[in-house]
Amino acid sequence: MLRSCAARLRTLGAPPARRPGLVWRLFSSEKVIHKDYGLPNPSWSKDLRLLFDQFMKKCEDGSWKRLPSYRQNPQIFKDFQTRFVDPRFAKEEQMSKAQQFTRSFEEGLGFEYVMFYNKAEKRMVCLFQSGLHLQGVPGYVHGGAIATIIDVTTGTCAIAEGIAMTANLNIDYKKEATCDHQVECDGSWHPGTMQEQ
Amino acid sequence: MLRSCAARLRTLGAPPARRPGLVWRLFSSEKVIHKDYGLPNPSWSKDLRLLFDQFMKKCEDGSWKRLPSYRQNPQIFKDFQTRFVDPRFAKEEQMSKAQQFTRSFEEGLGFEYVMFYNKAEKRMVCLFQSGLHLQGVPGYVHGGAIATIIDVTTGTCAIAEGIAMTANLNIDYKKEATCDHQVECDGSWHPGTMQEQ
């Protein structure tokens, strides 16, 4: 689907956020009070389940880790509140209604994906299946939806090393992807940049 | 929000699609059987309504045109079927369940936007307000959602000149956008590229 993609990420304000221990904890399953969307559901295709099983196998020796994924994560929110003094972040009531963009769809209709992280290689793999509500031109996945899943993969990989936001996103689309498409995004972290094939 | 953005678009397969008359018709209100989402609703902020009114005023002399926007558009689908023989596009039953990515959210929670087109200037303006389900890191709009609204603006501008898909999307994010953000995207068409400020 993609010929090439590059994303530059920058840390989000001061102080510099490089506390892998803390951020890695955000991926853990501690204090989980919401549904984990990074698990198979009936909408997943046979191929996606197969890939999922392959990566779960790789997790057995601890080299890879499956990342749970939520619509809301109060732990991450609290962490951001601690770091930023900006009063916009103090609106806890409003923020409690906010949802993760990629998890705001009904099962099977939007972004169906799971991410696996290899800490030693600083590498993130995202297994992704698109739903029928991600349509751009008829029959094809929207270019913005493709950009989103790339941004999620590279961004989450960067967040494993410190809180970050995308500074540049540069995508060459090789060919169109149909709405029933599934793909494996593979990103690795190099300071200042992310590369994805 | 954005320092700069560039998008390259390519026509979608053969034959080259440069029939402005036909494509322009896709923007018309003929045969509308679905709700038009490019109109104000109670979730719109005062500022967004004000901008909307300003552009509606510009439409009075015919230089600008507001583009209606739907979750599904059978006319566009039929047009794509005529152009492409690929059997994937013949699955009308499946495609009838597909929805436009940017219109697949409940009122006020996702992409609230309206586009205005100036045919003489080949220029598209998108007035956009983000909802709480477009969140990336807590409190901020997801980079993928920002990429999506840019892709929608540039893509729709290109489609006014012929059916097209995004070939490259290159975005520099100047600063973060909060979840209650609104912005005016302004794109113009030059053969082979789109520039947006």
Image (tube, coloured by chain):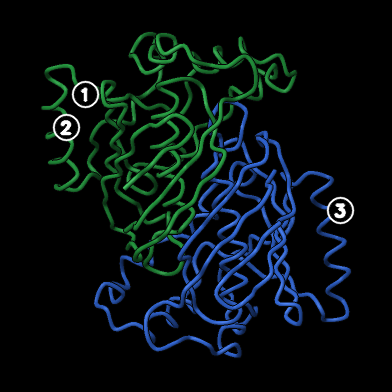
Chain colours: A green, B blue
- In the displayed structure, A46 sits above or below B121; it is above
Same-chain status of marks 3 and 1: no
Q: Nearer the viewer, mark 3 or mark 1?
A: 1
> As rendered, which of A33 and A78 lies closer to the eye?
A78
- Whole-angstrom CA distance, mark 3 to mark 1, is 51 Å
- Whole-angstrom CA distance, mark 2 to mark 3, is 51 Å
> As rendered, which of B191 and B94 lies closer to the eye?
B191
User: Percent position (x, y) of residue B179?
Assistant: 65, 35
Disc 2 to disc 1: CB gap under 8 Å: yes
- In the displayed structure, A125 sits above or below B48; it is above
Q: Nearer the viewer, mark 2 or mark 1?
A: 1
Chain letter, disc 2 residue: A
> As rendered, which of A77 and B161 lies closer to the eye?
B161
Horizontal side of residue B38 vs A123, given as left or right: right
Three-letter amino acid code at the position of disc 2? Phe
The residue at the far front in this view is A191
Residue assigned mark 3: B50
Horizontal side of residue A183 vs A195, given as left or right: left
The quadrant of the rendering that contains the C terminus of chain B is bottom right
Residue assigned mark 1: A64
Residue assigned mark 2: A55
Three-letter amino acid code at the position of disc 3? Leu
Q: Residue at (26%, 26%) from the top-left corner?
A: A121
Q: Residues within 10 Å of mark 2 (few under 14, many from 20)?
A: some
Give SS at disc 1: strand
Three-letter amino acid code at the position of disc 1? Trp
Which mark sits nearer the N-terminus, 2 or 1?
2
Q: Residues within 10 Å of mark 3 (few under 14, many from 20)?
A: few
Give SS at disc 2: helix
> As rendered, which of A196 and B101 lies closer to the eye?
A196
Give SS at disc 3: helix
